[in-house]
Image (spheres, rainbow, N blue to C red):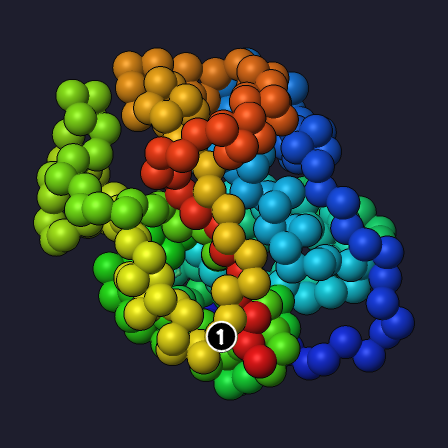
């Protein structure tokens, strides 16, 4: 698939209806896109974390029907499809051409009149074929941690974001240096400070960010302000579930994730002061 140059233009239509992407709605879309079987065992990257990230991101971007979102590292996720179903136009920017092809095929199979438009783009977040200062809404959901040259992608996000533009980013977090990941569960090898690769798994690069890394890699190059900051996956959802042997249930019985996302996650965020596994933050360019 050829790489194209896309130059998003400012919306000329009147503002559309606000998009409300709740956790329940995400699951309904997952079923519509992938069938009822996903309630038993989910597919692709959909998981508890996505039930937290997708609703947050749609809200953080203040999405309305007719808006355009640049989604960096879409993988084979349902997020761009959910946005399209909500009437939002999406640029699916992904390094892996097969995944972009998969996204396009999925889109063709599920498109309905009134959906937003879908612009698939095979490109790296480190060199985006997008005009400077032209993107008003950008999402990067659990994707930037897989890009080894994160300074390049940070610079690119800063370059393409328009004045007043918003980026909703979710990335792994740590306040101190992490020396292990999934200890005793999966074999992750430390390759740099706070960065790991899973033994025998190509493309499994995974980086944790400290506050100062986030400031250095994403905030300062964009000359942006952090306007929102939240965490998820602390000592309950991560420490007692995800990064433990219980992780074998991670992809199973999706309805349990609704309970964890809607009940346990808010409680954890309210009462648990331990490090979150991930942070979600929005950058706004002045
Ligand atoms: C965890 S997956 C995607 C998660 C997805 N955003 C979601 O909502 O589930 C990370 C994706 O980032 C992609 N990726 C890795 N390096 C990239 C790069 N330099 N530019 C764009 N995408 C990249 C990978 O191919 C992979 O599909």
Image point (55%, 26%), residue name: 267
Q: Quadrant of the C terminus?
A: bottom right
Q: Position of residue 272 (x, y in %)?
A: 44, 30
Image point (62%, 26%), residue name: 262
Q: Is residue 76 left or right of residue 238?
A: right
Depth order, front residue of 232/207: 232
Is residue 272 something one can see in this rendering? Answer: yes
Q: Quadrant of residue 185?
A: top left
Is residue 102 something one can see in this rendering? Answer: no
Image point (56%, 37%), residue name: 52
Q: Position of residue 199 (x, y in %)?
A: 14, 36
Could you classify mark 1 by the number of other residues whose Cα lies within 10 Å: few (under 14), some (14-19), or many (20 or more)? many
Q: Is residue 106 left or right of residue 222?
A: right
Residue assigned mark 1: 224
Image point (57%, 30%), residue name: 266
Q: Is residue 247 left or right of residue 57?
A: left
Q: Position of residue 193 (x, y in %)?
A: 14, 52
Depth order, front residue of 56/50: 56
Q: Is residue 114 above or below residue 197?
A: below
As drawn, the residue found furthest toward the bottom would be 132
Q: Position of residue 30 (x, y in %)?
A: 63, 32
Q: Quadrant of residue 150?
A: bottom left
Mark 1, secondary structure of its residue:
loop
């Amino acid at each position: 698939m050829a790489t194209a140059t896309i130059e998003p233009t400012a919306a000329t239509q009147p503002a559309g209806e606000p998009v409300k992407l709740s956790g329940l709605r995400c699951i309904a879309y997952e079923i519509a896109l992938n069938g009822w079987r996903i309630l038993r065992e989910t597919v692709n990257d959909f998981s508890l974390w996505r039930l937290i990230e997708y609703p947050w991101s749609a809200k953080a971007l203040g999405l309305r029907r007719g808006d355009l979102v640049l989604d960096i590292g879409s993988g084979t996720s349902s997020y761009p499809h959910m946005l399209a179903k909500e009437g939002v136009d999406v640029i699916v920017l992904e390094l892996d051409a097969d995944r972009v092809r998969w996204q396009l095929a999925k889109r063709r199979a599920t498109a309905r009149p009134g959906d937003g438009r879908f612009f698939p783009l095979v490109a790296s977040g480190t060199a985006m074929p997008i005009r400077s200062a032209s993107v008003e809404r950008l999402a990067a959901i659990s994707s930037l941690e897989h890009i080894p040259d994160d300074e390049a992608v940070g610079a690119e996000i800063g370059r393409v974001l328009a004045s007043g533009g918003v980026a909703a980013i979710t990335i792994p977090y740590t306040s101190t240096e992490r020396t292990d990941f999934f200890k005793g569960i999966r074999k992750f090898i430390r390759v740099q400070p706070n960065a790991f690769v899973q033994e025998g798994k190509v493309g499994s690069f995974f980086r944790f960010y400290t506050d100062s890394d986030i400031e250095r890699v994403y905030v300062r190059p964009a000359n942006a302000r952090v306007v929102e900051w939240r965490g998820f996956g602390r000592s309950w959802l991560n420490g007692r579930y995800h990064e433990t042997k219980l992780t074998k249930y991670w992809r199973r019985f999706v309805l349990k994730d609704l309970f964890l996302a809607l009940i346990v996650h808010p409680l954890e965020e309210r009462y648990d002061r331990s490090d979150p596994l991930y942070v979600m933050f929005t950058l706004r360019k002045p």
